[in-house]
Image: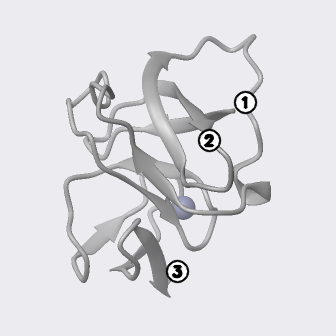
């Protein structure tokens, strides 16, 4: 599976975050690569289950952060080093919310 990822650091670059899954376990991020416009990504809105970083994941190429969260509004991924309960801002739609689960789903608090 390949999902689009943006850095929290206001970079315009878009990365492809590669995931694999073993059985019914979490989706494990394995690597992030710069995405060119001809590459199609999967729809993150359609993904079910938990996300995690695999031990080998090197982090976002733009900022090196191994964490990421899924926006509660647009459902896309933003790199982050935030923890549970922290306020985060989506790099795609600027929705701001609290990280509400361990695997970092941001709950929308305002548009
Ligand atoms: Zn968003």
Q: CA distance from mark 3 to mark 2?
A: 36 Å
Circle 2 sits on which residue? 22
Element class at badge 2: loop
Name the residue rendered at 33%, 28% in the picture: 57
- Depth-wise, is mark 3 or mark 2 nearer the camera? 2
Name the residue rendered at 30%, 68% in the picture: 88
User: Label 3 CB, ligand 1: below 8 Å?
Assistant: no
Circle 1 sits on which residue? 41
- Residue 33, given in percent of the width and then of the height, sits at 46, 16
- Depth-wise, is mark 3 or mark 1 nearer the camera? 1
In depth, the one of 86 and 30 nearer the eye is 30
Circle 3 sits on which residue? 111
Element class at badge 1: loop
Name the residue rendered at 71%, 62% in the picture: 48
Q: Is residue 39 left or right of residue 66?
A: right
Identify the image quadrant of residue 106.
bottom left
């Amino acid at each position: 599976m390949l999902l689009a990822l943006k850095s929290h650091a206001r970079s315009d670059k878009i990365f492809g975050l590669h995931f694999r899954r073993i059985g019914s376990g979490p989706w494990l991020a394995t690597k992030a690569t710069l995405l060119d416009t001809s590459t199609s990504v999967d729809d993150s809105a359609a993904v079910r289950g938990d996300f995690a970083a695999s031990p080998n994941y090197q982090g976002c190429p733009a900022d090196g952060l191994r964490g990421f969260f899924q926006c509660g509004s647009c459902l896309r991924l933003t790199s982050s080093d935030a923890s549970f309960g922290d306020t985060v801002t989506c790099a795609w739609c600027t929705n701001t919310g609290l990280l509400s689960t361990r695997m970092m789903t941001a709950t929308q608090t305002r548009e």
